[in-house]
Amino acid sequence: MSLLVVLEHDRGTWNDANDEALTAGRGLASDMGEALHAVLLGEGAQTLSDQAAQGGAEVVHIVSDPLLVDYGPEAYGQALTDLIEEAEPEAVMAIGTDRGNEVLAQVAARSNLGFVANCLSIDPSGDVWSVTRAQWGGSLLEDATLAGEVKLVTFGHHAVPGEDCDEPGEGSVEVFEPDLDDELGLSIVVDRQVQTSGVTLATAPVVVSGGRGVGSEDGFGILEELAELLGGRVGCSRAVTNNGWRNHSDQVGQTGTRIAPEIYIATGISGAIQHWVGASASKRILAINTDAEANMVVKADYAVIGDLHKVVPAISAEIRRRQA
Amino acid sequence: MRILVCVKRVPAPGAKINVTDDGQAVDTSNLGFTTSPHEECALEEAVQIAEREAGTVTVLTLGPAEAVEQLRYAASVGAGEIILVPTDGRSWDPQRTAAAITEAIQTSEVENGTYDLILFGNESADSGGFQVGIRVSHALGRPMVNGVKGIDLEGDTVVARREVDGGFEIYRMPRPAALGIKEGINLPRYPTMRGRLASKKVELNQLDVDAETGAQVQVKLHQPTENISETVILGTDETAAAAVVDILEEIGVLS
């Protein structure tokens, strides 16, 4: 028996979430007293088997089929469902990325098994597992139990930091070729559009955000200026996108982007929980707000209690002065 | 073009989410309710498509009797039919929820015909199970893609865009199909006075269906422990800029 960990890639490009998956997988497999297996689907999967072994996988299942060349939730879900019948793992685990949660939900639907998304901790002792999982994007926790022949779970993305593995696994490759129905090819990626290159909101080292307090679309000019000086990106709160001042792709929060910069500069943002869960992985938070009691100020590491329209340009001026 | 949107009534919390004494639910005694944000956008998208394609929009919710409030709201922004699948008021697990919604949709389709598009939210704002729409679509035999932030219709083909870091993935599916929508696909409209008045005349269709409980059982809700350190106040006006830049230098984000 085994714990089967689902790894992500695009045509052989390793996804960083895999380091989290293998780290969480090693811990869970050890708690279960089972061997750690990994699975990679699609074109280029084979080239990553060594990397999976380095992460502790004893067996690496390579699943290949013409329908699996590019990602497709239903084809991937059915292929994994077939692999589960073949390899008989005791549990299947992924990281709760968009794909991780989607693929395991597809497996759950196809096998009529329970599936618990975004776990923070799992106690696999006993036939019925006890888990703690994230509700409200992590603002609230739920203790739950999960029954079933095969357990399907994801760990929340960023819940378990990826760590190097001291004892690499055997990594013996087992190729599995499922017999997939062409109907499963209806929902497959057929093309890609590149929208931005370079630093994105999710990966920026500095994020300078504005909330309702910025007051207008034009008000973001001073935030753009500061972000550019710091090689960062501009973010915003939901109030801002709802007002049409910024595009939703700039929104930080539960229904926007989750950020993890070196420093988050939150200006004119009160800090409702839905915003906070998107920002809480920031290493440091500086709040600039006229309201000293604002949730964002209370939770920040540093704060300036003042008018962002004056403080932000002053910061930019000070940076320029020191750089001159 | 017949479009169905499945929505969920959720509390609208502020700075903190409190839990009831028995740990079984969010304490909503001081909270309003709203439609889960991704689903509010799914509804707006459905209404826009229906306007372009001369279609109809039906909205379905599984929830307590009070969820009629969210159905009426949906009617006030353009839904022509509303369906309530009533629960006992407690939170249902994902498998039970999906099975009941599946049966309700099947019942509705027998009476009125197949929905060309079924739209869900990517995940609910509260329990966030990431699976009900996918389970329903599979049970109905419809292709489904989650995380969609753009829809174009080309004849009988649905072209869906899904945001990935730095771009989009493109999917092409034949109708009937199902999509999980993410906030940001559009900016939902507010109801007009005329819409509000019209919504009162929309007939409520109630479908009483239930299903077996699933493998996941909620035991208790609780708040995460937070390590909140004391906030260092750097100043109360623009003279704080020097102290701010000192910190930026110290942590190495100034080149």
Image (cartoon, coloured by chain):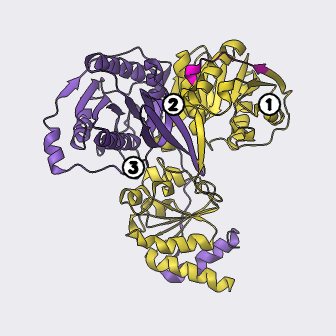
Chain colours: A yellow, B purple
Which type of secondary structure does the marked residue at label 2 adopt? strand
| Dot 2: chain letter | A
Specify the amino acid type for callout 2: Asp
> Can residue A140 be seen at all in this image of the molecule?
no
> Magenta span covers which residues?
A175-184
- The mark tally for this picture is 3
Q: Are marks 3 and 2 on the same chain?
A: no
Q: Where, quadrant-wise, is the N terminus of chain A in this rendering?
A: top right
| Dot 3: chain letter | B
Q: Residues within 10 Å of mark 2 (few under 14, many from 20)?
A: many
Vertical side of B185 occupied by A270: above or below: below
Mark 1 or 2: in front is 1
Q: Are marks 1 and 2 on the same chain?
A: yes
Residue A143: which numbered mark, if any?
2
Specify the amino acid type for callout 1: Gln
Q: Residues within 10 Å of mark 1 (few under 14, many from 20)?
A: many
Specify the amino acid type for callout 3: Asn
Vertical side of A22 occupied by B244: above or below: below
Q: Where does residue A184 sit, x and y in percent of width and height? A: 57, 23
Residue identifier under label 3: B186
Residue identifier under label 1: A46
Q: Alpha carbon of mark 3 to alpha carbon of mark 2: how far? A: 35 Å
Identify the residue shown where x is 30% and y is 39%.
B50
Identify the residue shown where x is 74% and y is 41%.
A14
Q: Where does residue B133 sit, x and y in percent of width and height? A: 44, 29
